[in-house]
């Protein structure tokens, strides 16, 4: 029985990612291949030159399995192929253009969500069942329920159009343009994290080891900060993985509403215009991002929770 | 002067179903160096009383009464003053060592913080002191093991750590709430041995909360038997075991399985269940389960005392005792169905 | 102890006591659901939400039949008018003169329908998957749950969109796609419940007494599964409605002439400066529905909390 080191834990987790990535890529590949009316649909009537081009580029004459492995190879090499709708651009280039913007907005939103959410949640937990708690949780429930594509227009109406304090759309890396998108993206996560933190903190505060800590005569602030905080935040940290996926999903809408040329916008355009390679490329790309971030969250969690590593080491 | 004198202790909880009366007028006193056992079924209020004394009740709990510890009333202390008493002058250990230690902090952290906070020791001094105590409770390889997490210890070891943690500041009073109940028998024996040594080697007073009569016989000087939130009998261990006066005490003793009974005989059981604390019966609270109940038991029973610490709360007379002159009035009238079910 | 203690307490045999306790057990067993119902009733937020939801469902089902016009009736004389009682357009009209109230109610039908059907798909897949994994245990369970873990990490919304792109936008596909990507949570919960139920003492005891498998499943496993499944249904419905609205908002959901709240919000957002009512009403209905379902789900979870009863 030994306590597994963080390193061992990380390595075993890393190996577990491979099947997930493989599944992701495989599903994308085969979905596109079967798309009716898609470029690989043999019944499509297209001018012969274009067909010849397609066949050359995608090696459609090869057996399917070989095409698959070729595709796999390209993905691993990082090449997502050319875009269908933007004739002069490759998917890679589009991703390179859009991702930095999306990542910035997303990253800021995550940070905001984590800190605002946990602070609100802890505050509510410490005032359990009093007015502040009920009020905050009611608002929190609202925050979860209102879809971000409802919040966003309202925010725009209120703060940009009627209030005139912030620009309504567009992107130029200025902080004014950033406020509304970041806040809109973060709001549902703030609400969820606040509720999660509150529930978790309340549960921790009722546990036996907190009673022991108090019985030892420790002042309340030490009890909360040293004994209660870490266990209470563990589920929240765990949630940051799925939270990332949720935010990436949300970014699609936010970028649309605020006319931000991020990766989500490209994705939606691609979906509407049936740009298969772009859509597929973004799915795989974002999939990788999510999987990597989940892995990091996993590591952080294991670092903070000694019990996880112990149970696996046995 | 006794180290601890508790009078008129009452503990209630507000619940959606009504007011739960966990402790209803409990008195006792404890001398320096004495080991007192508080015995009763689950739900008799034993733990709640101790928690109330130390201001560790849940939020919906209210306590009344006096608990004079070395001259000061604990019930009137400010939270800050209470904090300096808890853990340093009065230590409490709980029954479930599995969940009573913080799984996310090392043993070292959890032990050193006590002395660092109460006695201002530096980290290495605190650590050395903690290791000493771990040795004293026979944790092997204490030097290395102190850096481990609770889940790396066995149940018995965790309880020993809890005891060691309680002893760090050399408290005058140790309250042990069913310390070996959650552990298996061999480990129980070890814990009992530990406590026996503590009794012999220190002048610490101990309150043992338990429902295990064997432990009581083994370790304790005096016994208070508790039922439905009040004391029903009190005396030295010998008096309680060899001449129990109250029908409940007698029932408890009779229900202990014995090796010398004939096999084939049924186990003895006290019929019925402990009363619903939302709706306590009027008069004697044990009358529904007592085989000698009479009409007289519909009234609150008198308290018999002999002036030397022996007590019984029953209509049946106590050998060598007289009824207390004034019956302390119940703080609130007996509920006859109070509280919505 | 060398002497027998002085005692005259009545001896009642262990058998008698046990029999009495078993008689009580019957009473307590029945009251699991009654208990839960009581708890639910005390949860004011859940009750109020339930009432509101009933009203919404009523409005959405019956409303369009009571209105004087169809949702796609274009009233050219009153195009883009704000809500007013005189014109009869209580929610106003949109840019081509369609009554917003009618559109909102009709859209509601689609949104709620998708919610129900997709949840049903999700339910069927999730419960079967989870029950099989939990019941058979061992390697089967490990493989199945590992697969769930793998799929769980993937950006499912993107897959739904991918499916939409690949297969087009017909409504059956929407039901299936949304349901098919949403069953994971349900599967996990059902599997967990099945596993723990399989190993509980009362199931073991029942088997030891010779009760056959089917009866065990019927009397012990299913009622306990039901509770948890019901909670998850109420929590899945809003998720599914949200996903559908999301898709419709992006223009990838139900196709014209069908409309859903998401699509209506999308249209409303485009006109929001000049005609905010086109946004506000469908948005309000959508939000209120999600809000209420969340409270109901929460309330049910509290009422049926398995921790207290298993």
Image (cartoon, grey):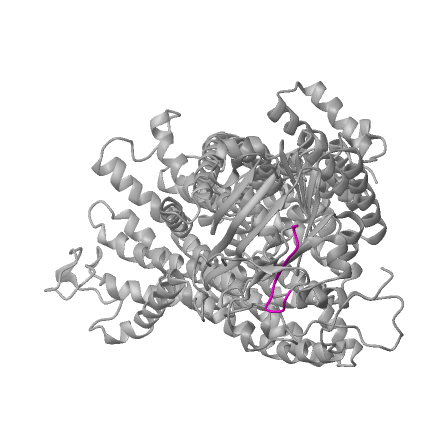
Q: Nearer the viewer, residue C93 or B249?
A: B249
Predominant SS along the magenta part: loop
Q: Is residue C146 above or below residue A14?
A: below
Residue B232 makes an appearance in the image: yes
Q: Residue sitting at 37 percent across and 56 percent down?
A: C262
Q: Where does residue A139 sit, x and y in percent of width and height?
A: 37, 47
Relative placement, left or right, of B103 versus B192 is left
Q: Is residue B68 above or below residue C88?
A: above
Relative placement, left or right, of B251 versus A130 is right
Q: Is residue C90 above or below residue C68?
A: above
Residue A85 makes an appearance in the image: no
In magenta stretch: residue B310? yes
Q: Where does residue A74 sit, x and y in percent of width and height?
A: 67, 38
**Image quarter for residue B191?**
top right
**Image quarter for residue A91?**
top right
Q: How many marks?
A: 0
Range covered by the magenta-colored residues: B308-317
In magenta stretch: residue C88? no
Position of the C terminus of chain A by quadrant:
top right
Q: Residue at the left extreme? A: C86
Q: Where does residue C222 sit, x and y in percent of width and height?
A: 63, 73
Relative placement, left or right, of C55 versus C93 is right
Q: Where does residue C34 sit, x and y in percent of width and height?
A: 50, 74
Q: Nearer the viewer, residue A8 or B141?
A: B141
């Amino acid at each position: 029985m030994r306590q597994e080191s963080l390193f061992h834990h990380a390595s075993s987790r890393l190996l577990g990612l491979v099947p997930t990535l493989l599944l992701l890529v495989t599903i994308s590949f085969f979905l596109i291949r079967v798309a009716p009316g898609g470029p690989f649909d043999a019944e499509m009537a297209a001018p012969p030159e274009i067909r010849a081009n397609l066949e050359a580029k995608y090696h459609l004459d090869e057996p399917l399995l070989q095409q698959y492995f070729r595709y796999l190879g390209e993905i691993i090499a990082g090449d997502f192929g050319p875009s269908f709708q933007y004739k002069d651009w490759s998917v890679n280039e589009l991703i390179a253009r859009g991702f930095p913007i999306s990542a910035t907005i997303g990253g800021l939103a995550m940070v905001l969500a984590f800190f605002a959410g946990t602070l609100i949640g802890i505050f509510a937990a410490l005032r359990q069942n009093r007015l502040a708690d009920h009020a905050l949780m009611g608002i929190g429930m609202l925050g979860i329920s209102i879809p971000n594509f409802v919040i966003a227009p309202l925010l725009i109406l209120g703060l940009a159009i009627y209030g005139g304090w912030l620009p309504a759309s567009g992107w130029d890396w200025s902080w004014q343009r950033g406020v509304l998108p970041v806040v809109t993206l973060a709001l549902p996560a703030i609400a969820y994290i606040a509720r999660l933190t509150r529930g978790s903190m309340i549960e921790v505060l009722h546990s036996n080891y907190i009673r022991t800590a108090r019985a030892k005569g420790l002042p309340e602030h030490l009890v909360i900060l040293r004994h209660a905080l870490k266990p209470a935040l563990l589920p929240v940290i765990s949630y940051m993985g799925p939270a990332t996926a949720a935010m990436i999903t949300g970014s699609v809408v936010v970028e649309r509403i605020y006319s931000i040329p991020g990766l989500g916008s490209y994705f939606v355009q691609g979906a509407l215009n049936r740009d298969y390679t772009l859509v597929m490329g973004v799915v795989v790309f974002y999939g990788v991002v999510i999987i990597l971030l989940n892995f990091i969250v996993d590591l952080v969690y294991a670092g903070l929770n000694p019990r996880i590593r112990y149970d696996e080491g046995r | 002067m006794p180290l601890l004198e508790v009078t008129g202790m009452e503990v209630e909880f507000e619940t959606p179903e009504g007011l739960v009366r966990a402790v209803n007028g409990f008195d006792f006193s404890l001398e320096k160096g004495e080991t007192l056992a508080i015995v009763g079924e689950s739900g008799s209020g034993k733990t709640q009383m101790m928690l109330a004394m130390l201001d560790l009740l849940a939020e919906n709990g209210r306590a009344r009464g006096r608990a004079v510890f070395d001259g000061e009333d604990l019930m009137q202390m400010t939270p800050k003053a209470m904090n300096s008493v808890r853990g340093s002058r009065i230590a409490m250990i709980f029954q479930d060592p599995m969940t009573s230690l913080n799984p996310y902090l090392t043993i070292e952290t959890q032990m050193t913080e006590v002395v660092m906070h109460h006695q201002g020791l530096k980290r290495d001094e605190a650590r050395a002191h903690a290791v000493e105590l771990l040795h004293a409770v026979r944790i092997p390889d204490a030097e290395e093991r102190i850096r481990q997490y609770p889940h790396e210890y066995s149940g018995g070891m965790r309880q020993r750590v809890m005891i060691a943690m309680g002893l760090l500041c050399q408290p005058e009073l140790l309250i042990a709430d069913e310390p070996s109940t959650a552990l298996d028998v061999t480990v129980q024996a070890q814990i009992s041995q530990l406590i026996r040594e503590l009794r012999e080697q220190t002048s610490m007073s101990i309150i043992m909360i338990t429902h295990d009569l064997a432990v009581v016989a083994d370790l304790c000087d005096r016994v208070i038997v508790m039922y439905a939130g009040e004391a029903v009998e009190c005396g030295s261990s010998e008096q309680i075991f060899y001449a129990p006066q109250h029908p409940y005490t007698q029932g408890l003793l009779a229900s202990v399985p014995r090796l010398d009974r004939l096999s084939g005989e049924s186990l003895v059981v006290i019929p019925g269940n402990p009363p619903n604390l939302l709706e306590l019966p009027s008069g004697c609270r044990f009358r529904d389960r007592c085989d000698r109940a009479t009409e007289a038991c519909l009234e609150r029973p008198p308290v018999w005392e002999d002036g030397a610490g022996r007590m019984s709360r029953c209509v049946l007379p106590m050998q060598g005792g007289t009824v207390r002159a004034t019956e302390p009035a119940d703080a609130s009238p007996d509920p006859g169905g109070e509280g919505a079910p | 102890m060398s002497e027998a203690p002085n005692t005259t307490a009545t001896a009642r045999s262990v058998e008698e006591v046990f029999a009495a306790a078993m008689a009580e057990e019957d009473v307590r067993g029945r009251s699991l659901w009654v208990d839960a119902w009581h708890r639910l009733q005390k949860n004011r937020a859940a009750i109020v939400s339930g009432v509101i939801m009933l009203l919404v469902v009523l409005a959405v089902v019956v409303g369009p039949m009571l209105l004087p016009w169809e949702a796609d009736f274009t009233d050219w004389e009153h195009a883009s008018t704000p809500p007013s009682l005189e014109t009869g357009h209580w929610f106003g009209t949109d840019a081509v003169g369609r009554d917003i109230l009618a559109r909102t109610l009709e859209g509601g039908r689609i949104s709620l329908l998708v919610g129900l059907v997709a949840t049903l798909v999700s339910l069927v897949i999730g419960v079967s998957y989870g029950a099989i994994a939990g019941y058979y245990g061992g390697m089967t369970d490990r493989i199945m749950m590992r697969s769930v873990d793998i799929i769980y990490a993937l950006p499912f919304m993107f897959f739904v969109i991918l499916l939409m792109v690949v297969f087009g936008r017909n409504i059956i596909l929407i039901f299936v796609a949304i349901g098919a990507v949403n069953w994971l949570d349900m599967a996990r919960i059902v599997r967990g419940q099945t596993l723990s139920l399989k190993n509980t003492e009362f199931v073991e005891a029942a088997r030891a007494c010779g009760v056959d498998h089917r009866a065990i499943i019927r009397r012990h496993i299913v009622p306990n599964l039901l509770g948890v499944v019901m909670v998850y249904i109420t929590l899945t419905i809003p998720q599914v409605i949200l996903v559908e609205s999301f898709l419709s908002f992006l223009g990838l959901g139900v196709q014209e002439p069908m409309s859903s709240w998401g699509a209506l919000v999308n249209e409303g957002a485009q006109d929001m400066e000049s005609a905010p009512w086109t946004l506000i009403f469908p948005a309000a209905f959508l939000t209120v529905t999600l809000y209420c379902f969340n409270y109901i789900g929460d309330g049910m979870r509290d009422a049926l909390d398995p921790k207290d009863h298993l």
